[in-house]
Image (cartoon, helix red, strand yellow):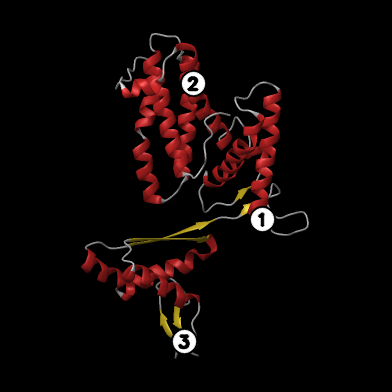
Amino acid sequence: HFFEAKCVFIPKFQSPLMLQKSDGGFGYDSTDMAALKHRLFTLGATRIIVITDYSQADHFAMCNTAAAKIGWLETQKKSKGIIPRLEHIGFGTVQGEDGQRFKTRSGDTVRLVDLLDEAVSRMERNLHDRIADKKASITTEQVPSVAAALGYGAVKYFDLNRNPTSNYKFSYDDMLNENGNTAIYLLYAHARLESICGKAIDKHNCNVDDLIAAKKEIVIGDAYERNLAFQLQLFADMVEETLEDLYPCHVCSFLYKTSGMVSVFLDKCKVLGTPEMESRLLLCRATAIVMRQCFDLLAIRYPMRI
């Protein structure tokens, strides 16, 4: 019973938060509330985000409500002039293609390092095949580093490109697809932009870095140029949205839409050897810079050549 225990009763929850048990002991309720108080009053945090398995959502909702009920948030408002934001993000379960919790054939939990190693191994084989078919812009010696960037990036992107509370099915074929909404597709799109800038130097003696230094301007004259330029302008709005609800899938969606517009732009608007070459090279570089910023936000490394 709760007669001698120190509890906080929260509306809409049957059981209270138990700050101290009747025998004088402390549990998770105690330590999480102590951590919350430390972050508010010692660290002076104005926004606290806790990330755990989604099954802990009710527990942290109770902790956050208790902090308000006790008066901690109002106290901080008086001293800092702002009510601290207390938030919880729950992540879903990774499932196998059979829809069950992802495990090895023996029933053991799959280690993340094994998933990453397998993704890298598959990308190494893919890159060696591309080199053999003369479809790659890298050497055999560069394969390990590029495969690592692609493989690790593919796993990260596959995980981040969804509502974090949702369960999802883990599939190497899906995440390593070069044509779908995957990191592989996005990284190839970025490398294509940089490849065009490199060819401009080799074949047309036109260095986009020199154009930037000379403060040359982008001149928008085509609808496909305009669509891509407008998309880049939405970058700041995407960041603001992500900061508000903390869903990295917004960054992924922005990257994917940008890459699609890159593909259409490059198919419809010739860059090299045209009167618009300088302006279009600048647009290519601007797009690559925005894409790299998105990759940085997702902690995905980007090879300049693939």
Instruction: Please identify the quarter of the rendering in which residue 283 is found.
Output: top left
Of tags 1 and 2, which is closer to the observer? 2
Mark 3 nearby-residue class (10 Å; few <14, some 14–19, many ≥20): few
How far across and how far down the image is residue 51, in percent?
A: 48, 59
Is residue 172 placed above or below 26 in the rendered structure? above
Front residue of this view, candidates 117 and 107: 117
Mark 2 nearby-residue class (10 Å; few <14, some 14–19, many ≥20): some
Residue drawn at x 52%, y 46% as measured from the top left:
160
Which residue type carries mark 2? Gly
Which residue type carries mark 3? Phe
Residue on which disc 3 sits:
2
Front residue of this view, candidates 299 and 17: 299
How far across and how far down the image is residue 126, in percent?
A: 68, 32
N-term-proximal mark, 3 vs 1: 3
Is residue 40 placed above or below 20 in the rendered structure? above
Secondary element at tag 2: helix
In the current view of this chain or complex, which residue is farthest to the front?
141
Is residue 63 placed above or below 250 in the rendered structure? below
Report the disc number at residue 198.
2
Mark 1 nearby-residue class (10 Å; few <14, some 14–19, many ≥20): few
Residue drawn at x 64%, y 47% as measured from the top left:
116
Report the disc number at residue 289.
none
N-term-proximal mark, 2 vs 3: 3
Residues at discs 3 and 1 in contact (Cβ within 8 Å): no
Which residue type carries mark 1? Arg
Residue on which disc 1 sits:
111
